[in-house]
Image (tube, helix red, strand yellow):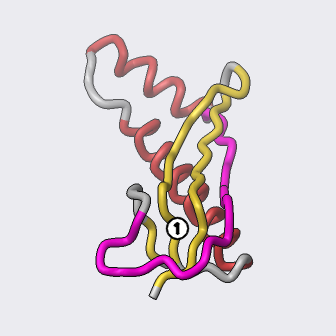
Amino acid sequence: MIIVTTDFVPGKEIKELKGFVRGSTVQSKHIGKDIMAGLKTIVGGELKEYTEMMEEARQKAIGRMVEDAKQKGANAIICIRLETSAVMQNASEIIAYGTAVVVE
């Protein structure tokens, strides 16, 4: 599956539009991660526990978007975007979306 943020795939011709595709996941914070992150905010530095959690969430959302595109018969996704939002105090949603296409 080709995935790009542009509205075309370099060197390929779009033969067919398959439509909007998306994938999402909601991740909650773990109490252990909260404690470690709280300590880090005192001294500063990267919150690696959250960085890892969000990377895993992005990969899940992209994987689900790819599955949606495959079910529609696409071999590429153009105009991909990633967004995040707070669902509740200790949970965030990551959504990946784009346009499924067939390229040659």
Q: Residues within 10 Å of mark 1 (few under 14, many from 20)?
A: many
Q: In the image, residue 97 lies at what x, y percent?
A: 59, 53
Q: Is residue 16 magenta?
A: yes
Q: With 36 as the anchor, is 90 left or right in this view?
A: right
**As drawn, 54 above or below 89:** below
Q: Amino acid at mark 1?
A: Ile
Q: Residue 12 sits in which quadrant?
A: bottom left
Is disc 1 placed on a helix, strand or loop? strand
Task: Please determine whether, in this image, residue 49 is positioned above or below residue 4.
Answer: above
Where residue 27 sits in the image (x, y, percent)? Answer: 64, 41
In the image, taking residue 51 as reference, residue 57 lies left or right, namely right
Location of the C terminus (image quadrant): bottom left
- Of residues 64 and 44, which is closer to you in this image? 64
Q: Position of residue 39 (x, y in %)?
A: 39, 18
Q: Main secondary structure of the magenta part?
A: strand
Residue at the location (51% across, 24% down)?
35
- Please name the residue shown 27% across and 14% down the image: 43
In the image, 50 versus 43, the foreground residue is 50
When asked about the image quadrant of residue 64, the answer is: bottom right
Q: In the rendering, at what x and y percent does residue 2 appear? A: 44, 75
Q: Is residue 72 magenta-colored? A: no
Position above or below: 65 against 73: above
The residue beneath circle 1 is 77
- Range drawn in magenta: 8-29
Q: Which residue occupies 27% across, 18% down?
A: 44
Question: Along the horizontal axis of the image, is 51 left or right of 74?
Answer: left
Q: Which sits in the foreground, 13 or 75? A: 13
